[in-house]
Amino acid sequence: MTCTKESCRPRSVFEELDRGLSEFMKGVLSPETSAPSVPGMTVFEKEDRYQVECDLPGIPLENIELSVENRVLTINGRRKQSQIDKSVKVLLNERPVDEFRRSLQLAKNADLTTVDAELSNGVLLVTIMKRPEVLPKKIQIRRSGLES
């Protein structure tokens, strides 16, 4: 192997980092790169309920199914692909298509009879109340007639 002046000189840490990042980023803006095939999700636990927010932008309500079976909440959906003319070269496509599925194991204290779902501005909000018997209870204290 022969060295040129440039290839044999020691590189600084910054040059190595730049070279590594450049190699890593080579494929990032290629048409083959795609976004995750499942929508993003956030799960919250509040004192009396669980809430799930799932990003489903551009997916019509009729293409979304929600089910609970064996304490597993499942969101199924179908995303319609944009019509792209065959003569157009796609440089970046981060809009996954086809079907997706997200499943979550629900806590034992979730009341499966209270599952409620609403689609608003591309976000599916699923609310599941906790079973009443597991919620904290405030005990009322009576006043005695013997107070001084």
Image: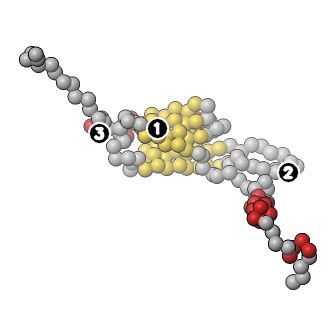
**Can residue 50 be spotted in the picture?**
yes
Which secondary structure, mark 2? loop
Figure quadrant of residue 113: top left
Label 3: few (<14), some (14–19) or many (≥20) C-alpha neighbours in 10 Å: few
Dot 1 falls on a residue whose secondary structure is strand
Which residue in the structure is indicated by mark 3?
134
Of the two numbered discs 3 and 1 on the same chain, state the one appearing first in sequence. 1
Q: Is residue 94 above or below residue 115?
A: below
Q: CA distance from mark 2 to mark 3?
A: 57 Å
Q: Residue at x 37, y 34 (%)?
A: 48
Given the image, on which type of amino acid does mark 2 rest?
A: Lys
Looking at the rendered structure, the kind of residue marked 1 is: Gln
- Is 69 situated above or below 12? above
Query: Is 73 in front, or is 50?
Result: 50
Task: Provide residue 58's location: percent of width, then percent of height.
Answer: 66, 37
Q: Which mark is residue 51?
A: 1
Closest to the observer, 79 or 21: 21
Q: Which residue is mark 2?
A: 89
